[in-house]
Amino acid sequence: MILSGSFTAASCLIIFALMFLHATHLSKSNEQIKILRISLIIPFWSIFSFLSVCFPTAEVYLHPWLEFVQAICLGTFFLLLCEFVSPSAQHRDVFFAALTVKNKKAANGEENGLEWFRKMWFAVFQYPVVTLLVAIVTAITQAAGVYCEFASKTHFAKLWVSIRSHGSILRGSGAALTEPKLSIISNVSLTVAIVAVLRFFMQLKPHLSEHRPISKFAAFKLVVTLTFLENMLPLAAFFHYAYSYRPYVIGSGRASRPLAGDHEAYAPRTYSGGPGGLWALIELWNPMEIVEAVAFGLRMKAEERKQQRAQKGWQSVQYQQVQEDYEMGRR
């Protein structure tokens, strides 16, 4: 326990150093605030995992909230990729409208770039909603005594909420406790979100190479792939490479440019993190960006369904008109 606590503390200190450097060199707040939020996955994962070792009975409550933190960080990573395209939503839409995406299922083998982008957006931001609901349901069913950690009969909520992950950690006097469970629902939701992010990255790979997106994504995903607290220490150090603050140092000559929009309009001139980066460290806790992203995804999905219904209705009217013309011709 002492060793695990030491690794947790060291990992947190390393990642907090990176966050402080970004906060005090905040030249592109739209990008760096997102980097600060993504960096939080290291201390959250380390501390929650350490608490699970110290208090094994609390693990069933803690793990679903770790999934929720992961969902927030993944959504924030997607928003960061969007910022690399353009800080302006309008310019971003213009960029994707001109983008051609290959789709074997489409009639001509291609898909409209803007429609594809909106599908990817919804696929990513359904994940925070699902994990939040799963975390709440897990807590409620566990408190009500209908969430069984070990049973797999249909009347236990665990069957519907989680599946076993490999491995175990010691509990109490030595009884086995399974490793953190992976929610069945969250697993499906996570797969959809990860595939969407990967498709988004692969489509934009030629345009985003200067931002090192592979390193950024690998740093994030390795945190939730590796389960031992000892692994958090090198990963925290790797974050310094993947999410370096140096490109945001004004006058360094390393500043990247957006793919769309007025490049000069987004050129940083001063740092805006406040004294000691205080404003940046406060702003990173603002949940409204994720809330608005989820709401935007839901609105787009509702609009898509509305258009599909309207299109089906129009096709039905056209078919009916053709039938009437055919009948009149026969007469």
Image: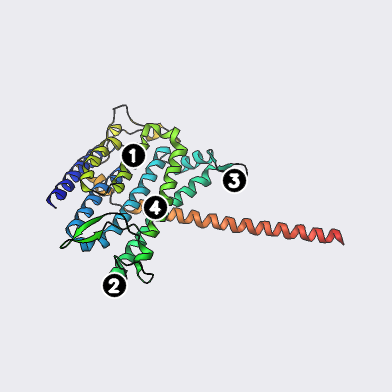
For marks 4 and 2, the one nearer the N-term is 2
Query: At label 3, which amino acid type do we have?
Result: Ala
Marks 4/2: CA distance?
27 Å
Secondary structure, mark 3, is loop
Mark 2 neighbour class, 10 Å CA radius: few under 14, some 14 to 19, many 20 or more: few
Give the side of residue 40 with respect to residue 115, left or right: left
Measure how far apart labels 4 and 3 are at the Cα level. 25 Å
Measured as percent of width and height from the top left, residue 58 is found at: 22, 62
Name the side, left or right, on which 166 lies relative to 206. Answer: left
Residue that label 4 marks: 190
Q: Nearer the viewer, mark 4 or mark 1?
A: 4
Circle 2/circle 3 CB separation < 8 Å: no
Residue type, label 2: Gly
| Residue underneath mark 1 | 216
| Amino acid at pointer 1 | Lys
Q: Secondary structure at mark 2?
A: loop
What residue would you read off at disc 3?
106
